[in-house]
Image (cartoon, coloured by chain):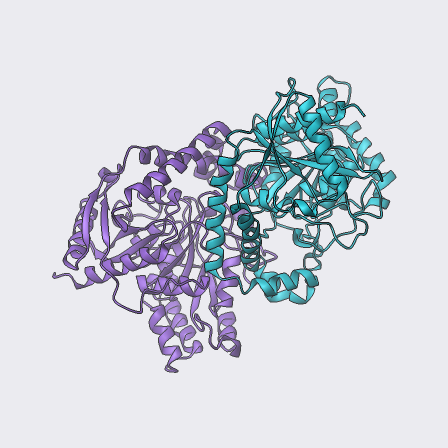
Chain colours: A cyan, B purple
Amino acid sequence: MLKALDLARQIEAGELTPATVIERCAEAISAREAAIGAFVIVDLDGARKAASDPGLAGRPLRGLAVGVKDIFDTVDLPTEYGSPIYAGNRPASDAAVVSQIRRAGGLMLGKTVTTEFAYQHPGKTRNPHNPDHTPGGSSSGSAAGVAAGMMPIAIGSQTGGSVIRPAAYCGVAGFKPSYKLLPTIGMKCFSWHLDTVGVFAAGVADVAFATAAITGRDLRVDRGAPAAPRIGLARTHVWTETSAAMRDAVETAARAATAGGAKLEDVVLPPIFEDAYRAHATIQEYEVYRALAFEYDRFGAKLSKPLRELLDAAAAVTPEAYDAARRITRRARQALADVMTDVDVLLTPSAPGAAPAGLGSTGSPTFNRLWTLMGTPCVNVPGLIDAGGLPLGVQIVGRFGRDRNALEAALFLEEAIARRPS
Amino acid sequence: MLKALDLARQIEAGELTPATVIERCAEAISAREAAIGAFVIVDLDGARKAASDPGLAGRPLRGLAVGVKDIFDTVDLPTEYGSPIYAGNRPASDAAVVSQIRRAGGLMLGKTVTTEFAYQHPGKTRNPHNPDHTPGGSSSGSAAGVAAGMMPIAIGSQTGGSVIRPAAYCGVAGFKPSYKLLPTIGMKCFSWHLDTVGVFAAGVADVAFATAAITGRDLRVDRGAPAAPRIGLARTHVWTETSAAMRDAVETAARAATAGGAKLEDVVLPPIFEDAYRAHATIQEYEVYRALAFEYDRFGAKLSKPLRELLDAAAAVTPEAYDAARRITRRARQALADVMTDVDVLLTPSAPGAAPAGLGSTGSPTFNRLWTLMGTPCVNVPGLIDAGGLPLGVQIVGRFGRDRNALEAALFLEEAIARRPS
């Protein structure tokens, strides 16, 4: 993989030029893109041109190529949202996060594959660790492209589990920041209370570096050894959905963290979180029925069957049910703050198991929905694999607005996992 | 003015057809649009065609023409956001609220004039009560068009004071619902924590009816006499900015409400609200620097001077200042809930006075910013005029999520003002 922090340090030291970074991306794309299909469109010429801009000097992401999920508007590249309704669509402005990447000196490498409107219907992307398995979704191309070494940084989005799950399946770091830390302007909306912009990179320190550069926030965790966190192991009410390999992975991660000096305790979430889990679906359905009203009302026949069926059902969600779901959300957020008074972060699976076989489904967001609804920072920590060589991701969940703490704890865990005796 | 509720009742009773409503709009546009300039584009042919659709039967807004501020995307009509950068722009999808209007049976009449990106730089619109005075902004065309009888319903947006202030200056009812009651998807973003979709109509019952129809929520207040509310008179820390005529208007409104049976008490807002007032500017600047990044970075020379200067200054707002402003906002919202434990609504000016003379400025959002930040429902109550015949609007502010209560109290006040002895 291309490691963002290493590349940035080499560029800063004059050992590497932005142009060389782009050529490394080009080599990986040449070698692997045909088999993996991470991109809707690659713009190597544009990236090469941008790499030669002297205005990049001094910018934190200078020379680093960034892939952007094709759910974000771009003026210079088509934006199709994974839907035939928008074939060849050229928006009139860039999404805010695209402008922020440019301001930070990042180079737009291309648009990565998304499922249809970031919902379930898969694109062409395959898992770099085994092409017969899903890369996860909906940010399929961003996760797979980083995993295949095609780019050091990629942008995705999560409404259910669309950042953390593909990061876990592809064995890269994925970061879903606190709700609205990164702006959703110019991102195709699915659910305005849930849509969250996220970032992919090789490791936790890379994803923290990239997000710090894009936001101008103090989120880097690479400048010293991470402090040992107090970790709450949260099995949640969907624990029975985990594979044996995932349960092993969580236990392994927990042991590694404890061996590294972390305090670990079991945390049992009160029943309100089961209500909140269900509230996620109510909120998503109510909002998507409005967010995709134009597409559903005018181009219903061009929607995939699962999405059309979701929208058919969503029409029946009443404002009263929606308001009740929003109230449950507020109560669950307060309850989560109480749960986390004695721990810094929670440890929980990133997905039920490794990437499932087959490309017809992108897997289950079971272990992500609740945290998307809570708006809390989540990090997929890579480093564990199953017997078949597929990645198994575990998830660090932080407190709302404490993104740096979540990243630091995730780095601690990543390092503890790497150091563990085999 | 065209009264939405009266028209809807006549259509329901078979006394009026949707086609006739469109012809009444056409007559008013023919008579007054040249002098007032409420529209960027009128689409009478489209509205006439839509009026003949048998699918309108049974829909709550059937046959009612709606003007939509040109800050909302429309596929069938150009969308220019009040900026030369977007001359002739044709979006690929409709804004969510446009789809919701169509679902409710409303007929798109045209796009109404907005200031540049709904900030300060004025469009061509004049005040129907005196063409030498501003109609207010940024939803200038929506307010002026309803006031001039060109359409019964119009959609606008408020980030500072862009719904309540033009409604007050033009003497119509304006409703800024609770934050996110109406979706902002497909509306050009200025500040994602502040942008709020609002509605204009002739009177309070009309604006409640229109919003009920668009949202499917129980917001109508025309089915019985409104209950007498407990009103807190909130002069706020910017009271010294009011004109003598506005102070008289507030006193008149207060007396009329009391005479009608309302309980009225003075409410003094604690100092946190002065901090919150300032926090509005910090949040708006931090967010607009990101929301309009594409336009500022690529087309800075095509921005008006005030907007460019705002963005120049906004670059310096730090994430720390922004986070602090967000924390102040949360504390002020809690404080507001405490302030309103003993009153149902607050009464406060909609603007410092009547519409100022001149078309170079759209007036001051001084009396609106705080409530936009609080996310609370606000209603401009029309019915009072100054010595020169210009409207003076007073504002009802409700509790967050209690939109129906706010509308009912506003209707009570509107009726009390109309009934008062002269």
User: Residue reaching furthest bottom?
Assistant: B14
Question: Between A113 and A59, which is closer to the camera in this rendering?
Answer: A113
Residue shown at 63% from the left, 44% from the top: A368
Q: Position of residue A358 (x, y in %)?
A: 81, 52
Q: Quadrant of residue A399?
A: top right
Question: Can residue A54 be seen in the rendering of this structure?
Answer: no
User: Residue reaching furthest right?
Assistant: A31
Q: Position of residue A403 (x, y in %)?
A: 57, 31
In the depicted structure, whether residue A263 falls above or below residue B298: above
Q: Position of residue B407 (x, y in %)?
A: 32, 58
Q: Quadrant of residue B66?
A: bottom left
Going by the image, does A248 lie left or right of B99?
A: right
Residue shown at 69% from the left, 49% from the top: A364
User: Residue reaching furthest left?
Assistant: B421
Going by the image, does A389 lie left or right of A240?
A: right
Q: Position of residue A307 (x, y in %)?
A: 66, 60
Residue shown at 54% from the left, 61% from the top: B77
Q: How many marks?
A: 0
Going by the image, does B75 lie left or right of A207?
A: left
- Quarter of the image with the C terminus of chain A is top right
Going by the image, does B40 lie left or right of A310?
A: left
Question: Between B168 and A269, which is closer to the camera in this rendering?
Answer: A269
- Quarter of the image with the N terminus of chain A is top right
Question: Can residue B16 be seen in the rendering of this structure?
Answer: yes
